[in-house]
Amino acid sequence: MASARRSGARLLTAAAFAIAPVVAFAQPAAAESFTHNFECSGDSPLGEQLFSYQQDSDVSAPSSVAAGEEFEVVIDPAVNTVPSEVNGYEVERMQGMELRLPIPDNSTHVSTQLEGGSNLGGAEPTVNVSDGIATLHVEGPISGGAEFELPTVTATLQAGDSGVIETRLHGTGYSDPGLTFDADVSTVLGTVGVPTSCYPDPNPVLTTTEIS
């Protein structure tokens, strides 16, 4: 998980797409810092748990590219902390985190590369692209109250013929989430699993690249 507005904790998530080295790249723009806000709903045996998560990251992409040119979008998440409690319940661990990012209009996914990251469990993070959505998967587990850092995602996209390429996170509501994970939480019933769905609110444009 990550920091909860109502619980006073923090979470991280981050985001990721396609990437890889290729032919000539446009001059990348300076990275811009964002705080990604997620509204979350946890499916608990004690009832729905509503809370907010935040994740900081630096995001960069070139301001313009030629038609058909390959270019990189880089998402570099900051260190975050799994909350030790949410809505008064102790968080024991978080696992199975998935962050979804749409492949932008006017572009084609080429490849994806992950670099770095820390305290993400035994398995290496992965990125899978299917049906126009890139999904970053972090298996975990990550203990409640522990610091962690998602990997830097470098996405290589190929520009289309014309228009503007805008990157942002996926998700419009709890039934169409951009971030999901499972949490083990201590309650009066003992340790219970809490599947959680989150969507970005607000969901601003992260990068804008004009095809010139």
Image (cartoon, grey):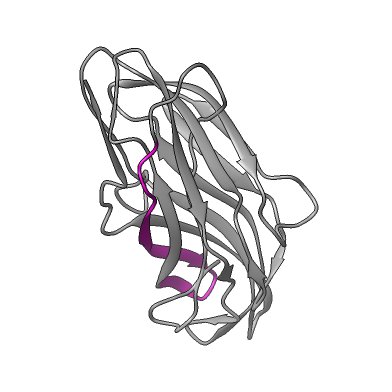
Q: Position of residue 22 (x, y in %)?
A: 54, 19
Q: Which quadrant is the N terminus positioned in?
A: bottom right
* Residue 55 placement, left or right of 67: right
Residue 122 among magenta residues: no
Viewer-side residue, 93 vs 104: 104
Viewer-side residue, 82 vs 153: 153
Which residue is the extreme one toward the right?
122
Taking the spot 39% from the left edge, 30% from the top edge, the residue there is: 103
Looking at the picture, does residue 180 appear above or below residue 56?
above
Q: Which quadrant is the C terminus positioned in?
A: top left
Looking at the picture, does residue 49 appear above or below residue 102?
below
* Residue 7 placement, left or right of 162: right
* Residue 6 placement, left or right of 185: left
Taking the spot 58% from the left edge, 73% from the top edge, the residue there is: 81
Taking the spot 33% from the left edge, 30% from the top edge, the residue there is: 104
Viewer-side residue, 23 vs 81: 23
Q: Position of residue 168 (x, y in %)?
A: 33, 43
Question: How many numbered dots are placed on residues in this image?
Answer: 0
Taking the spot 42% from the left edge, 64% from the top edge, the residue there is: 41
What's the magenta bit mostly, secondary-structure-wise? strand
* Residue 125 placement, left or right of 136: right
Q: Position of residue 16 (x, y in %)?
A: 49, 42
Which segment is the magenta one?
28-50
Looking at the picture, does residue 59 appear above or below residue 52?
above
